[in-house]
Image (cartoon, grey):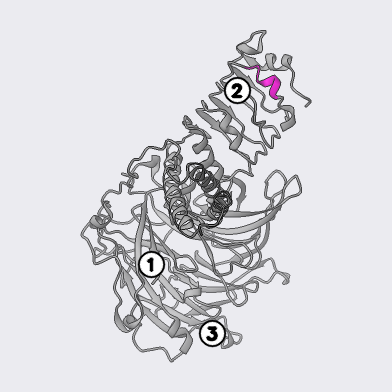
Amino acid sequence: MGPLSARLLIQRGRPKCDRLGKIRSLDLSGMNLLSEHLDPKLLSRLKQLQELDLSNNQLETLPANLGLSHLRILRCANNQLGDVTVLCQFPQLEELSLEGNPFLTVSDNLKVSFLLPKLRKVNGKDASSTCSQVENLNRELTSRVTAHWEKFMAALSPEEEAEKAQADFVRSAVRDVRYGPESLSDFTQWRVRMISEELVASGGTQVHEANISERPPKATAIQEPRAGPVASKRPGDVPVNLSPNKRVCTSPLAQVEGSSVGSAGSQTVLQLEPLHFLQCHSKNNSPRDLETQLWACAFEPAWNEGQAGATSQTVATCGGEAVCVIDCQTGIVLHKYKAPSEEFFSVAWTALTVVTQAGHKKRWSVLAAAGLRGLVRLLHVRAGFCCGLIRAHKKAIATLCFSPTHETHLFTASYDKRIILWDIGVPNHDYEFQASQLLTLDTTSIALRLCPVASCPDAYLLAGCEGGCRCWDVRLDQPQKRRVCEVEFVFSEGSEATGRRVDGLAFVNEDVVASKGSSLGTICLWSWSQTWQGRGSRSTVAVVVLARLQWSPTELAYFSLSTCPDEGMVLCGDEEGNVWIYDVRPLVAQRPPPPATPQAPTQILKWPQPRALGQTVGRTMVNTVVADPTFTYLTALTDSNIVAIWRRNQP
């Protein structure tokens, strides 16, 4: 496509006329236009243009001087745009489409809301929630920059030149003022620079907040949970005996800080502060939706080099037809992906290095999500779209996880009693994945939890199943591409515990495994290395138990435990809305003979009192709880459609 001409614009404009100045709607979509094809001198003659469609082209940027001051609707979907600041030239814009621009991020969405005060819809959705996020961020950043100014000016000596000092202030503010998740750092630094320069220009007397009116933040309306039985988790589940002792009520519990109990009570109690209680998975965003079941959550790892043991404070949650990506610090839902008729059961993160058409290398955080329909969706989180679909199983997928050593290797476990290892590959220039199947592992019962062995993740895979705990050889240098179970682990030889459901499984460190479900009211800590060394040629092996942890005596199933290896913690929710926290470092370090009685938890985090939160948050069942690697944030999912986030207060 060459440069645009007046004749072409008249042909593609509406209403039909012979003058550019009368055109109100112009369709330039699907013409392979490059940025240099948009001639400002020509387009500025469209004095009455209100609607412009530039979608499905190859635009990397828009000229900054198009002169379309009356433009109300702009469509730029499926291009290569990398910057949105030029959109400020369209102050009357009400509707904007930017879907399919893979280099735009969540930060760009916030910039758009800040720059365009009359914007009502973005990508076909109401823009009010994003505007609210921008208000909160802007208010906090303004406060922090102002505080930084006062501290900076107080430290200046009289002889320092004011002009140089002010320039130094802007640089220091951009460097030092931080707020919100890493995924929003581009937006926050952009706003910090603007606020700083405005503060310098006014001599520190005032900061303009972009005409954002002061109004109290919206409280998440959470109704009292229903009283009654909990729905079965997934199709095909073994029926669970719902005990009448299972209570869902609104009576307040003890203090939110929790209590230290039993023999572990001498350890320091963690001070955990409730931050956010969200209903971001609700159908039609209704606060009355207490039916949507939430099933899994996972923190995004910090993929940058030199950040081992760190985290991004970004957590993904799934339930119903939605996957949400949430910033724990602010409570902002950074992205919400919906798939009608789907019910998501599991999410897992990886990061890929891709090469753009321009030859630039970019690091992508990719989120895999799967559930009822047997499909794996690969979500490009920063750009906010689904860029890959794997038709993995004909039945529902119960759980999935990525290999810790191969960023493209993904395990999926289905109700068809198979576990499949996939290589999802790296997306091509059109952002398409071509997945290939590497291994098929046959199971005799449904796998509920997958866990590559920490000390040899490329060799063995552990799985907690409906029928017990099992292990497979997953080495790719072996010829068989379809394999049966290598060994079954039992937790008490010759007892009724053999073959019981294991619905919780995670490594505490490279050797110690925490598992739940093999015996009522306890969590078992056992040694992988000692168990494996004593295996011999047997296909059924009793685990070498290091300790047992006291847990709720409930007969309900599907409470997923998790671990925080860097902090030596084990976490599990219960049917009363409690979070059981165990500091197991003394147990795994000393390796004493297992005590006769289960060890009490270090702390039980109680469900917060409604009045303390200013919300109606009744007692509810916590089925999943995870913490980031530094144990700064803790996220819990409930049976009544609540995502709860706590933060640890450092001493």
Residue topped by disc 2: 68
Q: Residues within 10 Å of mark 1 (few under 14, many from 20)?
A: few
Q: Which of the 4 image quarters holds residue 436?
A: bottom right
Please indicate whether residue 571 sits to the left or right of residue 442 in the image. Answer: left
Residue 325 on the magenta segment: no
Which label sits on residue 583?
none
Identity of the residue furthest to the left in this view: 251
Q: Is residue 641 above or below residue 556?
A: above
Task: Tell us which disc is closer to us: 2 or 3.
Answer: 2
Q: Is residue 245 above or below residue 295?
A: below
| Distance between mark 2 and mark 3 Cα atoms | 72 Å
Amino acid on which the number 3 mark rests in the picture: Thr
Which of pointers 1 and 3 lies earlier in the amino acid sequence? 3
Which range of residues does the magenta coloring cover? 40-46
Q: Which of the 4 image quarters holds residue 533?
A: bottom right
Residue topped by disc 3: 531
Q: Which of the 4 image quarters holds residue 328?
A: bottom left
Residue topped by disc 1: 649
Please indicate whether residue 290 sits to the left or right of residue 473 in the image. Answer: left
Q: Quadrant of the C terminus?
A: bottom left
Residue 45 on the magenta segment: yes
Q: Residues within 10 Å of mark 2 (few under 14, many from 20)?
A: many
